Image (tube, rainbow, N blue to C red):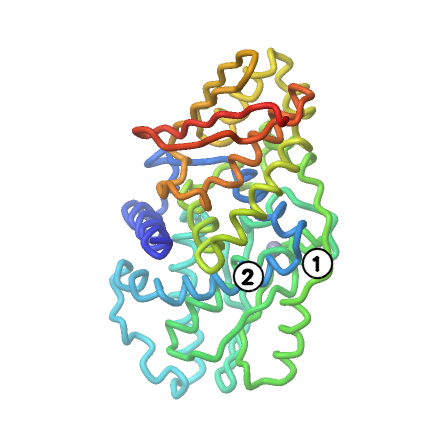
Amino acid sequence: MMDKIIENAWAELLAKATKKQGVSPRLITGDDIDLYIPQSRLLALAESNRAVFRLIYLSAQESARRNAYMIVRKLGMPSDYFWKFELWPRERAFTTLTKIVHRIFSTIMSEAKEGRLEVKELTIDPLHIRIDFDSCVECAGIKGLQIGICYYHAGTFAGIIAALVNQDNLDCFETDCYAAGGEHCSFVVGDKSDKAFVQKFDTYIHPPDIKIDLVDRLTKSLKKDSLRSLGNMVDVNYLRLLTANILRDNPRLFASTNSEVGHRFGRDVTKTIENFYGVEKWRAVQNYYHDLCQLNVDIKENESELQITVRGKALPTDSRTETISFLLGELQGLASGLTGKEMALKESYFKDDCLVITLVPQS
Ligand SMILES: [Zn+2]
């Protein structure tokens, strides 16, 4: 099921990106969502448990590997394009891989803008590739960290390149990250038989705890501060990919963590949202979801409960609780912060295209 969602998300991203070369996919479809949403979901999770970065990496890697053949097909390349890549002359390998990697990633990851991704170094045996990546959407708008946070991209690079050149033993780590003060994000793809590489990868995949100022990040989005040259929007499929990738491998763990994290997160951002909009509290929540999340939220309050209806493009296509647990947690957190009462989930169900949620004060 998750695989289906991931596959569809990839397919849609590719279909849009390949349809009109040079035109941003979001200009064609309007399926865009504020970058803040996927980022905050991901980073709030990673903050609560640093093992999450490793899970993000592994899931992205696996999903990219599995979907690489579809990606290659969609781009009109033969599936054995890189046959016996390890025997290619270096010059040809460099030129070809640069071209293909560039095409794939600039197509699906940075709004089809050219010149954002560059293969900087390539050695073949053992394979070692350095990729510089500008305007990375994973860390845009985040600053002042000690470590790089673009684990989703690292995993995706590792997975797609491994599938392309038909080598199973590749990994990837980030050496430079915009969030950690770099000019751009820089990634190294390498071979697991290379001891020096493995050592660095091990350090990377077991990062220390981090603390990210998500309220500051939210404020940027609310004020529509454009993040570098990127704008603030990404295709909603990017969010789907992130969520489904992480959920796939450990749905239950993530359902419970997600709901707790969402709850805390909702509480943290309550004041910011209320102050920013300066309108009646439920209207502020409505504006927040409308402006940033592509969701229409309707809230009815009576003495005993809150009845919330959610609809919109960014609502998960899969109705299981795992995929909506962050949203449920976030709404509880917001409602608790706004009412001053601890609000608990009484029930939630899908009806037609809507998610219907009832929250009640905790007894
Ligand atoms: Zn980065």
Which of these two is toward me, 256 or 32? Answer: 256
122, above or below 246, in the image? below
Mark 2 lies on a secondary structure that is helix
First in sequence: mark 1 vs mark 2: 2
Q: Position of residue 179 (x, y in %)?
A: 67, 51
Q: Position of residue 329 (x, y in %)?
A: 56, 36
Q: Which residue is mark 1?
A: 147
Which of these two is toward me, 219 or 55? Answer: 55
Mark 1 lies on a secondary structure that is loop
Q: Which residue is mark 2?
A: 55
> Label 1 crowding class (10 Å Cα cut-off): few <14, some 14-19, many 20+?
some
Which of these two is toward me, 350 or 157? Answer: 350
Q: Are marks 1 and 2 in contact (CB under 8 Å)?
A: no
Q: Amino acid at mark 2?
A: Leu
Q: Amino acid at mark 1?
A: Ile
168, above or below 354, in the image? below
Q: Position of residue 232 (x, y in %)?
A: 53, 36
